[in-house]
Image (spheres, helix red, strand yellow):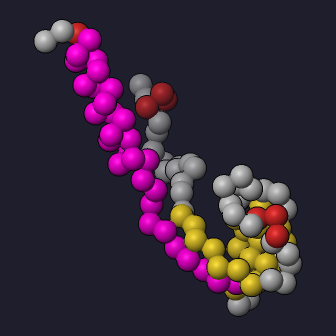
Amino acid sequence: MKPKIIYLLTAITLVLAAPLFAAGGKTYEMTGRVVAATGTTLSVEKGTEKFEFAIDPATIKGSAELKPGSTVTITYVMSVTRVETPGVASPASSP
């Protein structure tokens, strides 16, 4: 096969497989009362607990209308930004 065809097939495969890799984790839903809402954060109270979420106003429909005291139902995913394991040496510090 010609290299151009191989590159084209590889690119098509990656484009079609991208949604599989980009799939987020399990989604969760919660209903609560808005405590505070700014352009990029949302604080929701459910019972006695308060939860804070980062939001993207460009993708969250109706984020401009979030007012303290209103009841909302939110759908969210949990994601990890950093993992530390105490007592385990990192590869860079190994002898």
Residue 22, position in %: x, y? 43, 47
How would you classify the magenta stretch by its main secondary structure?
A: helix
Question: In screen coordinates, is 72 left or right of 4?
Answer: right
Look at the picture and state if 14 lies above or below 75.
above
Confirm whether the magenta stretch covers residue 64: no
Q: Quadrant of the C terminus?
A: top left
Q: Name which residue lies at 70% across and 84% down.
A: 32
| Region in magenta | 4-32
Q: Residue at x 74, y 84 (%)?
A: 71
Q: Is residue 68 above or below residue 25?
A: below
Which corner quadrant holds the N terminus?
top left
In this rendering, the count of numbered labels is: 0
Q: Residue furthest bottom?
A: 47
Question: With respect to residue 58, does 70 lie above or below?
Answer: below
The residue at the point 52 percent across, 50 percent down is 83
Asked if residue 52 is positioned above or below residue 95 in the image, the reply reads below
Side (left or right) of 1 relative to 25: left
Q: Residue furthest top?
A: 2
Does residue 81 appear to the left or right of 61 in the view shown? Answer: left
Q: Residue at x 49, y 68 (%)?
A: 27
Residue 12 seen in the figure: yes
Q: Looking at the picture, how far across and down is residue 33, in whole percent?
A: 76, 83
Q: Compare residues 69 and 6 and report the one nearer the observer.
A: 6
Where residue 10 appears, x then y in whole percent?
A: 27, 25
Where is residue 30 drawn, in percent x and y? 60, 80
Is residue 50 visible in this depiction of the protein?
no
Is 17 inside the magenta-drawn segment?
A: yes
